[in-house]
């Protein structure tokens, strides 16, 4: 595997390998601190990001490497009309690996076709966000110790949420998975994901508008924000943005070992009062993101023969 564009680019064995490496990094950080010395990561971020961009940068720095790149399209030659293909070939002259976020679906794939170094998709529109999915998988494994026989509730924006789409794809490959889809009618999971992923893999799922109704059966609750930037109509956003707000009151019927996840940033869909609950693992999830990206950078650089 030269690039990571979709979570489906990884086999289950490769995911297991990445999780094992991430766990080893957590246990033995000094073992990895110089492994990418003199190697450079280029972060090509055409839309805003805090966690993803900084976690990629932290990951490379903690491996002993260095980072170059840009954090908005206006500060790159894209503002002058340069194509993604030309950017990819140019950056290949400067760096050893690329992490790219782009508002257009498929842009990281185009980048990978023209780059001579590994490319990691750091999010493309409402399409894929595979390193967030790897972050989620590492978090699930560290919180639950397994991937099979879990009931996962996805709550909020299931229509535009690329993190939701990717995690459903990833979890559909494990046994005993049940999916609960909690959203306003207007933000339901796209029918093609239900057909091509859930139904195609015989994953049982239910759709509901009520979080309280399904709370007692959940092993994992994956909260998402309603994304203002994906809406064409401000009125629709304002009407739907507070559809679900998780509070300590709503968690009273939840399992004692529920794992509450969120890809962040949060707006107000999880009350800050929930942060003190030991079941809240979204900030542990953030830290896991750094470790799994360290493991991925290592894997791709090794397979490209660059370390």
Image (spheres, rainbow, N blue to C red):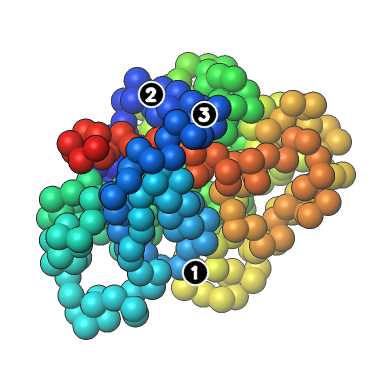
Element carrying mark 1: helix
Q: Locate the N terminus by quadrant.
A: top left
Residue 65 seen in the figure: yes
Element carrying mark 3: loop
Name the residue tied to disc 2. Answer: 17
Going from N to C along the chain, the mark reached first, 3 or 2, is 2
Name the residue tied to disc 3. Answer: 28
Report the front residue among 164 and 213.
Answer: 164
Q: Quadrant of residue 301?
A: top left
The residue depicted at 47 percent of the width and 73 percent of the height is 232
Mark 1, residues whose alpha carbon is within 10 Å: few (<14), some, or many (≥20)?
A: few
- Give percent across and percent down for residue 132: 46, 45
Report the front residue among 269 and 41.
Answer: 41
- Give percent across and percent down for residue 239: 65, 68
Mark 2, residues whose alpha carbon is within 10 Å: few (<14), some, or many (≥20)?
A: some
Name the residue tied to disc 1. Answer: 229
Of labels 3 and 2, the one closer to you? 3
Q: Are marks 3 and 1 in contact (CB under 8 Å)?
A: no
The residue depicted at 33 percent of the width and 43 percent of the height is 36
Element carrying mark 2: helix
Going from N to C along the chain, the mark reached first, 3 or 1, is 3
């Amino acid at each position: 595997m030269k690039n990571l564009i979709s979570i489906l680019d990884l086999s289950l064995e490769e995911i297991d390998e990445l999780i094992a490496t991430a766990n080893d990094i957590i246990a033995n950080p000094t073992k990895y601190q110089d492994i990418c010395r003199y190697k450079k990561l280029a972060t090509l971020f055409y839309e805003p990001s805090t966690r993803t961009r900084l976690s990629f940068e932290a990951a490379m720095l903690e491996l002993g490497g260095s980072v170059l790149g840009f954090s908005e399209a206006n500060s790159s030659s894209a503002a002058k009309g340069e194509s993604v293909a030309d950017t990819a070939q140019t950056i290949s002259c400067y760096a050893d690996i690329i992490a790219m976020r782009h508002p257009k679906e498929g842009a990281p794939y185009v980048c990978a076709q023209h780059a001579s170094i590994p490319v990691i998709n750091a999010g493309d529109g409402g399409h894929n966000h595979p390193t967030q999915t790897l972050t989620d998988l590492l978090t699930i494994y560290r919180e639950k110790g397994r991937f099979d026989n879990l009931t996962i509730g996805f709550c909020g924006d299931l229509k535009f949420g690329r993190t939701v789409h990717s995690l459903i794809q990833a979890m559909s490959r494990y046994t005993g998975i049940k999916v609960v889809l909690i959203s306003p009618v207007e933000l339901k999971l796209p029918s093609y994901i239900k057909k091509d992923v859930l139904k195609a893999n015989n994953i049982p799922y239910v759709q509901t508008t009520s979080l309280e109704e399904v709370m007692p059966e959940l092993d994992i609750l994956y909260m998402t924000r309603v994304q203002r930037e994906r809406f064409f109509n401000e009125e629709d956003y304002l009407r739907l943005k507070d559809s679900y707000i998780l509070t300590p009151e709503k968690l009273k019927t939840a399992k004692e070992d529920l794992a509450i996840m969120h890809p962040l940033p949060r707006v107000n869909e999880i009350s800050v009062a929930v942060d003190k609950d030991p079941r809240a693992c979204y900030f542990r999830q953030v830290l896991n993101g750094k470790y799994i990206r360290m493991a991925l950078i290592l894997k791709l650089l090794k397979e490209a023969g660059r370390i």
